[in-house]
Image (cartoon, rainbow, N blue to C red):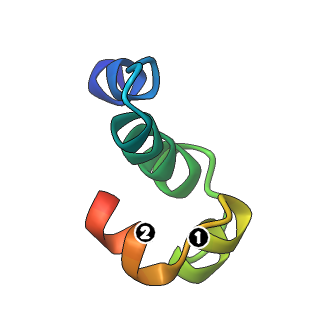
Amino acid sequence: MEAVGALEASPVAVDAEAGRIPRAYGVDRSGIHGQVARGLRIGRATHFRRL
C-alpha cells in the first residue's frame, strides 16, 4: 500500500498512472483488467505496461 501511494503521489504522470492501476484493480476491486483500463481511460496495452 505504501509503494502504491508513493507511485500515485509522483509528479511524473507515467508513475502516477502506474500507481492508480494496482489500487483500482487490487485494492478497490473496480473490476477486471479491461474495466479498470476503461475506468482510467487508458488502453489495455497501456494498462498492462503500467501494471
Give the percent coordinates (x, y) of residue 10. 38, 20
Crowd rating for badge 1 (residues with CA inside 10 Å; few <14, some 14–19, many 20+): many
Give the percent coordinates (x, y) of residue 13. 44, 36
Q: Dot 2 corresponds to which residue?
A: 47
- At horizontal 39% and vertical 81% (from top left) the residue drawn is 45
- At horizontal 57% and vertical 77% (from top left) the residue drawn is 32
Q: Dot 1 corresponds to which residue?
A: 37
Left or right placement of residue 32 versus residue 10 in this view: right
| Quadrant of the frame with the C terminus | bottom left
Report how far apart the C-alphas of labels 2 and 1 lie in the structure: 6 Å
Of 22 and 42, nearer the camera is 42
Give the percent coordinates (x, y) of residue 37. 58, 70
Label 2 close to label 1 by CB (< 8 Å): yes
| Secondary element type, mark 2 | helix
- At horizontal 68% and vertical 65% (from top left) the residue drawn is 41
Of 48 and 29, nearer the camera is 48
